[in-house]
Image (cartoon, rainbow, N blue to C red):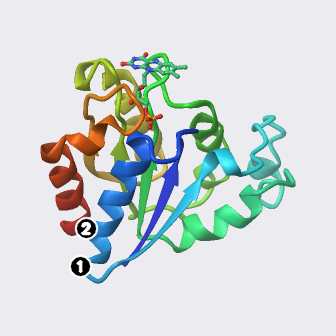
Amino acid sequence: MKILALMGSPRKEGNTDILVDTVLSGAMANGHQGEKLNLYDLNLLPCIDCRNCKNGDKVCTRDDDMRGIYPKIEEADVILFGTPLYWYGPSGPMKLLMDRLLPYSETETLKGKRAVLVIPSAEGADACKHVVTMFRLSLDYLGVGIADVLLPTAYERGEIAGNAEELERAREIGAAL
Ligand SMILES: Cc1cc2nc3c(=O)[nH]c(=O)nc-3n(C[C@H](O)[C@H](O)[C@H](O)COP(=O)(O)O)c2cc1C
């Protein structure tokens, strides 16, 4: 099984990054393939609602790094969305990537795939309910089911590395995929 991890925090070795790596290592220990993309390292343009993906040949015509990401999304069995909570929503690049999934609302390309959400925040799980709903409704629209959700509490860079319980849960999520 192929797992594509979309890492939407600017902090390398921050909480999202550590948790995403831990989910991936749990999955890879069980024989799955994993790949991580750091969204902040990529050139991602915003969706401009040009409607080419709806009316034309059903593809996005924006010329940026999404051209390389679309095939990876299509090949993946599981997509891991990792983002810190930013003002009760996802980080900017993660929202931008979500918007760029619009072409798949016209096709059934993503139908049957599964997703995992990893969202650390200072306030913890309760504060994440709206962003989880955003992911759930959007992914449901695309036919993608949410396999698991991890919403740990952490604030400082790398703080989560000291939380053995959440790391174990991340590893288990990966192993159970
Ligand atoms: C711009 C910004 C907005 C944030 N908004 C929230 C928020 O609304 N609620 C919250 O609990 N934490 C908020 N945080 C804290 C981060 O979610 C938290 O520090 C998280 O662990 C960062 O993950 P990272 O280490 O992967 O970057 C915010 C941080 C930043 C930089």
* Residue at 42 percent of width and 37 percent of height: 135
Question: Which of 139 and 11 lies nearest the eye of the viewer?
Answer: 11
Question: Which of 167 and 157 lies nearest the eye of the viewer?
Answer: 157
Give the x, y percent position of residue 111.
45, 61
Q: Quadrant of residue 74?
A: bottom right
Give the x, y percent position of residue 23.
30, 59
Question: Which of 162 and 117 lies nearest the eye of the viewer?
Answer: 162
Q: Quadrant of ligand 1?
A: top left
Q: Quadrant of residue 95?
A: top right
Can the viewer see residue 156 in this picture?
yes
Give the x, y percent position of residue 55.
80, 49
Mark 1 Cβ inside 8 Å of ligand 1: no
Question: Looking at the image, which residue sits at the far left?
Answer: 165
Query: In the rendered view of the protein, which quadrant contains the N terminus?
Result: bottom left
Q: Which residue is mark 1?
A: 30
Within 10 angstroms of label 2, few (less than 14), some, or many (20 or more) residues?
Answer: many
Callouts 1 and 2 close, C-beta under 8 Å: yes
* Residue type at numbered disc 2: Gly
* Residue type at numbered disc 1: Asn
Q: Which mark is residue 26?
A: 2
SS label for mark 1: loop
